[in-house]
Image (tube, rainbow, N blue to C red):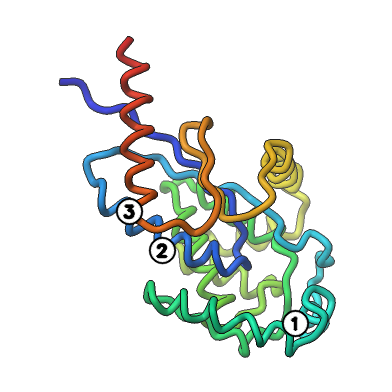
Amino acid sequence: MSALKPLTLDIVSDVVCPWCYIGKRRLESALALVPDVPVEVRWRPFFLNSWVPREGMSREQYLITKFGSVDAYEDIVENVVAAASQVGLEYNHALVKRQPNTTDCHRLIYWAARDPSGDKSAAMKQRLMELYFKEGGDLTSTDVLVQAAADCGLDAERVRARLATDEDLDVVSSQAQEAADKGISGVPTYVFAGKYAVSGAQDPQLLARAIRQVSAEVNAEAAE
């Protein structure tokens, strides 16, 4: 029997999206339910808050601009905190002092996927999310981003030099625009084999069923 063809699974998400943070953990649980199905996960950029300037802004001003007031956000955030806790994650929203533009975060993930020593994109994605949601890290800081890259095994000084340039800004922008052109307006969105899309931080069981079903379809087509 020939080996199964890997299923391509594109995850369109942003590192400052709490449901993407939760969705990543649920996806990991889903993959553990289908260990016999080969899956190639590819992280794709999305700008949840494209209006935030490249240098970022204060968290307070961001919350006022987006939600009307800090109190308005406080009224809704506890549901997200609880959902994160249910999958073993921490969302310490009071620690966040700066709201980043995530362009450079997406560049790091893109570079991590292509690191000479192997794909480190999942680790990079996780580290950036942990910095933001768990530690209240300042993702507008080059030093913070460089350390995050080093934590994931990337060459720190090379990353620092690349961040100082416009390298791959066009790639990240075009990938985000491609998602928008396909009608993706909410994240996380899971795109199976480039054909089927599911939005929202879905339960692991649902994701696992989708992975198995689309993998079977892809491999049946390959066998024809």
Residue 46 appears at what percent x and percent y? Answer: 67, 53
Mark 3 or mark 2: which is in front? 3
16 and 105: which one is in front? 16
Residue that numbered label 3 is attached to? 205
Residue that numbered label 2 is attached to? 25
Mark 1 secondary-structure assignment: helix
| Distance of label 1 from label 2 (alpha carbons) | 25 Å
Identify residue type, mark 2: Arg
- Mark 2 surroundings: few (<14), some (14-19) or many (≥20) residues within 10 A: some
Q: Are marks 3 and 2 in contact (CB under 8 Å)?
A: no
* Quadrant of the frame with the N terminus: top left
Among the two numbered marks 1 and 3 on one chain, the one whose residue lies closer to the N terminus: 1
Residue that numbered label 1 is attached to? 59
Among the two numbered marks 3 and 2 on one chain, the one whose residue lies closer to the N terminus: 2
Mark 2 secondary-structure assignment: helix
Residue 41 appears at what percent x and percent y? Answer: 44, 44
Identify residue type, mark 1: Arg
Mark 3 secondary-structure assignment: helix
- Mark 1 surroundings: few (<14), some (14-19) or many (≥20) residues within 10 A: some
